[in-house]
Amino acid sequence: MIEISNVLTLTGERKSFLIKSNDTVKLDATNLIAFPGLIDPHVHFRVPGQEYKEDWCSAAAATLRGGYTTVFDMPNNLPPCITQARLVEKKELINRQLQAVDIPLRYQLYLGADKNHFDEIYKVKKEIIGIKVFMGSSTGDLLMDDESSLHAAFAIATKLNLVVAIHAEDEEMIQQRRLKYKSHASHYIHSEIRSPEVAAKAVAKVIELVKLYGTRAYILHVSSISELELIAKAKKAGLPIFAETSPHHLFLDTDAYTKLQGKAQMNPPLRSKEHRLALFEAIHEGVIDTIGSDHAPHTLAEKSKPYGESPSGVPGIETNLPLLLNAYNQGLLSLNEIVALTCYNIQKLFNLEANEDLVLVDLNQEKVVDQSKLKTKCGWSPFADWKLKGWPVYTIFNNRIYNLQK
Ligand code: DOR
Ligand code: ZN
């Protein structure tokens, strides 16, 4: 039996919990506050094909350590997850790995939209959380940058009542700007090539498609003012558009390149401080609905390569909640905003049932992000050595209590 007494709830009451378990744990949780188990709607756990970067054994441990109990995994694998056969195979691999570590993580998978495999969406409609559209190229070779394919994907999604999750960067502009800046060798140029205009052009296209088809569109990793303005206007007009932002866009800006170089490279890229601060405003105004970690691990060796060879993406699932709690302690976010962004709004958008999972948080604990303690296989973080106030200390999931301080 797990007995937790005196924990503070988000509504300000004190509560005690009795959880059936083989473990015998008595916990006086007077100093802790109970959050629901968090949901990460955007992770890249690299199975199949890039298990040297991450697999579901390491990722499951990282997930629980971050205070999460549910994840939605992206399809840009090797090979990409774009057919029913590959989806089935991917699920088998994941289940085997989760069994090996005895962590029955809650997970959902996206199917990658691919112009030669639209028929596959019909076959798997009940088994996926949504379809992922890469309007701009990123890690892997999934790409849908032509008009007619985009129209087809949005039309099918509406017909099947599926959410379309969109990587909104305009491919044509990326290619043009890559040529323009081809003689620049520093990682910083990544933010110039994939400028805010590149993202805004794609978001404007998404809004046009939503107007035409009424598709529920989930715009991933929103990072710039122009995207926010377009999304705010579309929401006001009543369109079913939803927006995610990422911890790196909220807490890092282009200043980070000096220290991090390739470790600050991701798609969409870091923006200036002005854009970063606008994201907090957009959260307060309800323009941003969710935060996805966009946990996208690459090895240190890969990230240390010169610009042009270094891959885009950063790990984030273990540091997101402490970053948000630290922002709460700085007066930048409320606890209700944090829990809406990381759980309730995601449940609503994707029609997920609530569960009994809990994460117990110590709002006053101060600790430095210690890379050597991370569970992610890649073993590094862009937030290494940041001193943060507010940490998850226990995740309660599947009738077990995980002590995150060990
Ligand atoms: O930076 C990124 N990394 N952006 C993406 O769109 C993909 C991701 C990855 O899978 O590495
Ligand atoms: Zn991603």
Image (cartoon, rainbow, N blue to C red):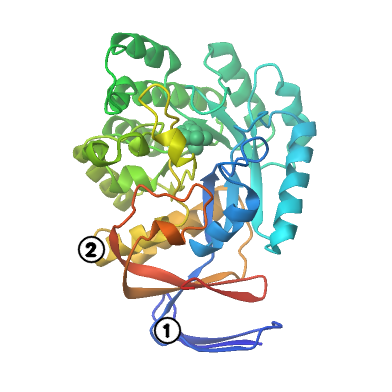
* Mark 2 Cα shell of 10 Å, populated few (<14), some (14-19), many (≥20): few
Viewer-proximal residue, 224 or 29? 29
Q: Check disc 1 and report the residue beneath it.
A: 13
Q: Is residue 183 left or right of residue 359?
A: left
Q: Check disc 2 and report the residue beneath it.
A: 331
Q: Is residue 236 above or below residue 211?
A: below
Q: Position of residue 225 (x, y in %)?
A: 27, 34
- Write down the quadrant of residue 337 in the picture: bottom left
The image quadrant where one finds the N terminus is bottom right
Q: Position of residue 349 (x, y in %)?
A: 54, 48
Sequence-wise first label, 2 or 1: 1
Q: Position of residue 244 (x, y in %)?
A: 43, 43
Identity of the residue drawn at 22% across and 37% down: 258
Viewer-proximal residue, 25 or 257? 257
Mark 2 secondary-structure assignment:
loop
Query: Would you say residue 239 is visible in this rendering?
Result: no
Q: Is residue 331 left or right of residue 155?
A: left
State yes or no: discs 2 and 1 in contact (Cβ < 8 Å): no
Mark 1 secondary-structure assignment:
loop
Query: Would you say residue 153 is visible in this rendering?
Result: yes
Type of amino acid under label 1: Glu
Q: Position of residue 129 (x, y in %)?
A: 64, 43
Q: Is residue 130 above or below residue 155?
A: below
Viewer-proximal residue, 149 or 83? 83
Type of amino acid under label 2: Gly
